[in-house]
Amino acid sequence: MYAAMKSAEDKMEPVLKTFRTQVLYLKHNLNARAIGSLKGTSVSIGNDVTDLVQSIDGSMQEADKLIASLSTDDNS
């Protein structure tokens, strides 16, 4: 029985080594895909941030106009 168990153990290591290699390959492949998919996402986020900054700038200009109109009304 011990000999049979030892034989089975000896056969497991090559299988486990192949399995570990495949897992490592999958990790790298999935990481590369994930990073690749983030490139498009980062462009989209960048565009969204640009739009937001432009919107904030527009709001600030409107607020400045309102403040300026209030100031001229007070001076009248």
Image (cartoon, helix red, strand yellow):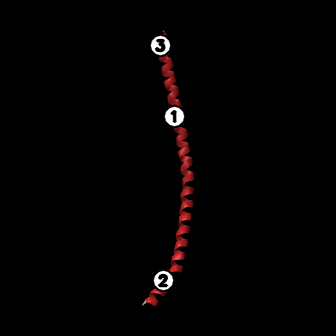
Compared to 54, does 10 lie above or below? below
Instruction: Give the foreground label among 2 and 1.
Output: 2
Say which element carries label 3: helix
Amino acid type, residue under disc 3 in the picture: Asp
Say which element carries label 1: helix
User: Which residue is found at the position 51% from the left and 84% from the top?
Assistant: 10
Instruction: Give the foreground label among 3 and 2.
Output: 2
Say which element carries label 2: helix
Amino acid type, residue under disc 2 in the picture: Glu
Q: Which residue is mark 2?
A: 9
Q: Which residue is mark 3?
A: 73
Labels 3 & 2 near each other (Cβ < 8 A): no
Q: Which residue is mark 1?
A: 55
Amino acid type, residue under disc 1 in the picture: Ser
Q: Earlier in the sequence, mark 3 or mark 1?
A: 1
Image quadrant of residue 2?
A: bottom left
Q: Earlier in the sequence, mark 2 or mark 1?
A: 2
